[in-house]
Amino acid sequence: MTNPNNATISTVHTADFTSGHALQIPTLRILQDDGTIYPGATAPDLDQETALKMYHSMSFIRVLDERMLAAQRQGRISFYMQCLGEEAATVGSAAALDDKDMIMAQYREQGALRYRGFSLEQFMNQLFSNEKDLGKGRQMPVHYGSKDIYYMTISSPLGTQIPQAAGYAYAQKLRGLSNVTICYFGEGAASEGDFHAGLNMAAVHKAPVLFFCRNNGYAISTPANEQFKGDGIACRGVGYGMKAIRMDGADILAVYQATKMARDHAIATNEPVLLESIAYRLGAHSSSDDPSGYRSKEEEEQWRKNDPISRYRLWLIAKGWLDDAADKAQIEALRGEILDALKVAEKVAKPGIEHLISDVYAEPIPELERQLTELKAHICKYPDAYPITSGRM
């Protein structure tokens, strides 16, 4: 017997419910907290150069996050978001991709950006919205983007990139490209309508997109158990007719292996895959958030033992690929480099006001030009309220 979708179905002759917990997806784990491999597990095939690039990308982001949150507290930048505790999820997944696979991020994927080659100077220019910023100062801090390294500019509203990723991946297929799109989002964004529309579109049209859900326990202040019932997010992929896999998001080897397997499947079949990373958000949601209002210090400390960088570091040292003393010296030197780059970037002039309307269309339309003229007149009328570097307007 077949259903309207031409899929073979089984039949029963007595009524009974199927429990929502009938499908419980296991969590892939390879690397233990002490840096050893779980019994029965096999580490992915990584060469030393790639393995160290992954580690240094994670370490860079950890130090950058520490320094830039401090800069926000000092009033030097307006806003910041850390990926503390989720470095393995973003770096490990990016490492499993081809350099021309499109990345559509949410806002906590700076690890993927760093792995792709985004420089320290580029990070700083974006965070300070200066005239060297690739986005011309028109985005909030941490809303990165780079056409050169296939990293779509981040947008603040939750979930908007999910249907966009389905469409972009479908276009990749139509063009005959051997590439995929990876789309990152949190478990909170999986409650948005765009999540369901995007996954359904990708499944029906067979788009090679990897939907990567970072389930970090909280949608700002709302814990996961108050957001949804059922077995997390991965099981929803099965409901939409796609492959799904869940992994320990603090285990970079598990993330890398799962993402590589998902990419191989998407390329071979032109089908989407849903991946779910389980990794606790150790920091606040953003610099505007105080997590002490909704979770305990004891909870945070319990998860802190599951640090993604320390366990991977132990694995690298055990393999003889990383020297303990040299690494500590390099981390210390990195702190100095980041502080130096910060001091340079914050002194660079802001973009000229004309960049507010450039690149919106191929040529600025009359309506935008009229608005810009009105804005300039307003600024000239109230110069004390809008301090502008001489000649910048």
Image (cartoon, rainbow, N blue to C red):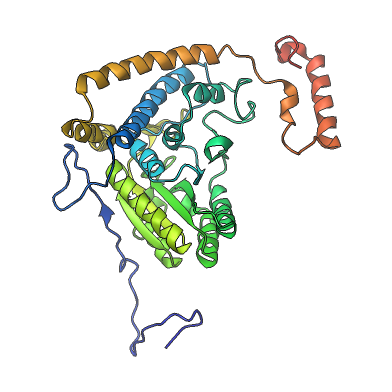
Q: Nearer the viewer, residue 344 or 375?
A: 344
The total number of labels drawn is: 0
User: Whole-percent x and y of residue 332?
Assistant: 31, 16
Report the residue at 61% width, 31% height from top. 139
Name which residue lies at 20% across and 50% down. 42
Using residue 168 as the reference point, say whether residue 340 is left or right of it. Answer: left
Q: Please identify the residue farthest to the bottom as the structure is shown.
A: 13
Tell whether 101 sits left or right of 89.
right
Which residue is drawn at the image coordinates 33% and 81% (left, top)? 16
The percent coordinates of residue 351 (x first, y second) are 67, 21
Q: Is residue 123 above or below residue 237?
A: above
144 or 375: nearer the eye?
Answer: 144
Q: Which image quarter holds the N terminus?
A: bottom left
Residue 228 vertical position relative to residue 293 in the rendered view, above or below: below
Q: Could you tell me if residue 88 is visible in this image?
A: yes
Residue 146 shows up from this direction: no
Residue 324 at what x, y percent from top left?
20, 23
Q: Is residue 109 above or below residue 71?
A: below
Which image quarter is the C terminus in?
top right
The answer to which image quadrant residue 2 occupies is: bottom left
Residue extending farthest to the left is 39
Decide which of 358, 42 is in the foreground and name it.
Answer: 42
Q: Where's residue 115, x and y in %?
A: 42, 34
